[in-house]
Image (cartoon, rainbow, N blue to C red):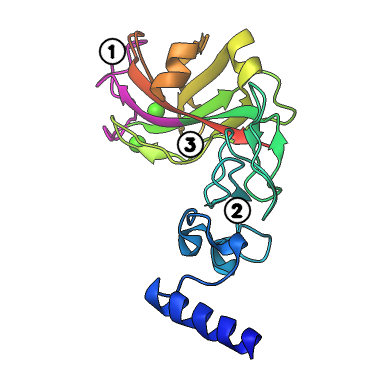
Amino acid sequence: MKLTHRILTCLGLASFLLLAACGPEDLSPGGPDPITDDPPPLTELCTAESCEGCCDPTTNKCVMTRTADACGPNGSTCSKCTTGMMCHPSKQQCYTPTIRTKIQPLRAQIAPLDPSDNSDWDVDGSPPDVVIQLSCPNTPAAVPPSEEVESFTPTWTKGSCDVLSTDLLSAPIQFTVIDVDAIFDDPIASAQYQMTRADIDRGVVELTGSSALLSVAFQVTTYYAE
Ligand SMILES: [Ca+2]
Ligand SMILES: [Ca+2]
């Protein structure tokens, strides 16, 4: 009877204290709201299943676009590549890239008359039929010549060479421009040029000079190879 009375008193007290429970362990003041401390939903966790990128070690968020600063397999912790290395897009790991440069003859301007005899390039008075043959340092096989274009201002899309950028900076390119004729081709110009890092950065090289070849331009495209 006494016990029952105590329970009832406790219940009455509890309701009076607005749901404060009986017992000394429940009298301490409440801490932070437990709801806000819940772990994030499972979908926000960065795992190989949920993340097609690497996981930022600080935020644990998925980094979809890998860079040299954040590289690693799907769901792994992103790591920073050391200087000079890049993040391989498909292998998803840091690697040391090989830098190559493609040189494509773009266009030229040919003198109106052949300066060797001050006459028309062709006996029928038509424009020269211009082919450029490029040669680049340390290329194992000869580069095929450009297509033949009958014009005083020919433009080309073929005849490129592809070299290691370090080779390109250590030895000059050579090129020969001719007017293709039925029997004897007319030479227009033959020259060499040492590419510089500024040329590579600029992406195009314009050369001017000879009496027959007034100007010639090359596109310089640098890219990372495996
Ligand atoms: Ca000719
Ligand atoms: Ca012609």
Instruction: Report if residue 125 lies within the magenta region.
Output: yes
Q: Residue 182 — which label? A: 3
Q: Is residue 22 visible?
A: yes
Q: Are marks 3 and 1 in contact (CB under 8 Å)?
A: no
As rendered, which of 124 and 2 lies closer to the eye?
Answer: 2
Above/below status of 138 relative to 43: above
Q: Amino acid at mark 2?
A: Gly
| Disc 2 target residue | 53
Say whether disc 2 or disc 1 marks the residue closer to the N-terminus.
2
Instruction: Report if residue 218 lies within the magenta region.
Output: no
Residue at 45% of width from left, 75% of height from top? 13
Q: Which residues are magenta?
A: 105-127
In percent of width and height, residue 184 lies at 51, 27
Above/below status of 129 relative to 109: below
In percent of width and height, residue 114 lies at 33, 17
Q: Secondary structure at mark 3?
A: loop
Residue at 61% of width from left, 57% of height from top? 46
Say whether disc 2 or disc 3 marks the residue closer to the N-terminus.
2
Q: Alpha carbon of mark 2 to alpha carbon of mark 1: how far?
A: 66 Å
